[in-house]
Image: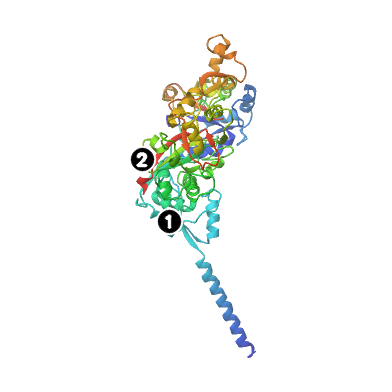
Amino acid sequence: MKKLKPWLLLGVFLLISLLATYALYADEAKITVLNPLGYSPPIRRVPMAPRLEALSGKTIYIVDVKFPLTEQFLAEMQKVLTEKYPQTNWVLRDKRGTYFDDDPGLWAEIKEKGSGVIMGIGH
Amino acid sequence: MEKLGKPTAPVITNVFEDLVKTIAFKKGMPDQRFVFVPHPVSGKPASTCREYLEGKDPITGKPVLQEIVEVLTKPLTEEEKKTGFIERPKPPRLAGPDTPENLQQLFLKNGWTDGLPIVLPTEEKVAEMLRGTSHKPDEMVAQMRPSPPHEAWEYTVEKVAINAVMAGAKPEYFPVILAVASTGVTSLFTSTTSFARMVVVNGPIRDQIGMNSGIGALGPFNHANATIGRAWTLISRNLGGGGTTGQTYLGSQGNNLNYNNLCFAEKEEELPEGWNPVHLQKGFKPGESVVSLFSGWSIIDNGGFKPYSFQEVMKRQSLSFFTSGTGNCFKNGVPDSAALTLLLDPLVAKDLKESQGFKTKEELGQWLIKNTFKSTWEYWACRPDDLKKAQEGVEPFASWLKLPPGALVPVPVFFDSNKPIEIIVVGGRTNPFWQAGDFNYIASASVDKWK
């Protein structure tokens, strides 16, 4: 046992040195970099409009946003909804211009005469 | 409409679920109710549309009609009634410490790259890049958004420097990159049509930083061309909020040109006399260094075909470049126009000036505008109202309808003559070729301002 002691001590010393060197090397290999992301704006919540108690007796606008070759879908939507919910007035309107354009006149009409809106459809 | 107090049921095709929910969230409507139908509906007959409407929402599995009614009538939840601001965690200033390998993976996983390894933006490298400009690191450069419905992000000089380092650019390129960033134009436009962009550099900066305007200028052969173009893509992703597929990028197939954005220097030294470089055409002065940005989709390589002159070949190729033009587009107020940008090897430019007599770029552009006519098939596709008139015997449409297949009607392809045809000279004189694309001009910015 006495003969083993020096070897044991040497072995422990070497092991500790190895671990210390590894730890040192591992720390040196790590770097810090800058985040490349820009700054996004704050988001203010837009409160949702109160919902309708019922559709019966109401006027619901169906707005075609004018994506090419989709008008038949909105036209069919008006037909189907009229069949299924005949007590509701389903009004189909084309938005002015292209799908890029705003239509304040239509929004004003809906605000005055409509109870709700369905809007569609891209592609 | 919700703001106007009207309950609204947006009906969307299902492939755009991520897009619409992302936009709704960023517009302050995280709880917006949607109804989805199968994609696409464009061009589908009424019977198919009815099937979709009487069928189920592909996302929720609920009957579509029932869902429309619920969106309009189901009372709001407490969450849906909330007001105020939505908290978004601010991105930390630093990333790490970690090994370079792990950081490369982090950047890739976070969608901060173009899929290729980047130069990691350590504080030392960014500081070095910032020495390429006299502007302060915290100076706001611009705002950028992927397309109009999306929110705009803003960014500082330092943020542009970080992305310039990532692209592998040198500090001497930084004023060019800042000039591009200052336009606020994204290189990764959202559209489903897969847009491409082009960057043309003019002025003394080209030689000062070793840009290529000769052999292989549009190819992967020059450090400045490669990294400046790449930086714009990274800026568009990281500073402009673009490039997140399904949310801020919807290009159905994508566009390979987005890797480098066709970044090159114009060969000003070999412009024929009287042919001005791009930056002069855009109102800048000789001696100024300028970047000019263009937008389109595709570019094709062309050579001459004897016995035709170069411009005759260009005329015929131009028929491929209408940027919109279905009858539906025209009916909806979108003019059926075309855009054209020509990238001419100096040999082609020389021939067009000396043999064909075009004294300026503008003369060539005007000649093409006046002499490039629509083919019959395109004309009737673009103008269904005129087709109806033709069928009713109204002239001149009725006579045009009698033209043989393959004939041209005397209506110019380049309908929007307010937009010039862009002509740029670049190349190394090894072959009289040119490249033509459906690009139009967007903006220019001074490089000198950012030195």
Which label is found at residue B126?
1
What secondary structure is found at the residue carrying circle 1? Answer: helix
Residue found at the far front of this picture: B355
Quadrant, the N terminus of chain B: top left
Q: Is residue A12 left or right of residue B448?
A: right
Q: Is residue A4 above or below residue B333?
A: below
Please give the name of the residue rendered at 43% of the width and 60% of the height, measured from the top-left corner: B124
Q: Chain of mark 2?
A: B
**Residue at which label 2 appears:** B286
Residue B438 horizontal/vertical position (percent) = 52, 32
Please give the name of the residue rendered at 53% of the width and 54% of the height, measured from the top-left corner: B106
Q: Is residue B384 left or right of residue B85?
A: right
Residue toward you, B337 or B327:
B337
Q: Can marks 1 and 2 be said to lie on one chain?
A: yes
Residue toward you, B322 or B65:
B322
Q: Earlier in the sequence, mark 1 or mark 2?
A: 1
Q: Is residue A25 visible?
A: yes
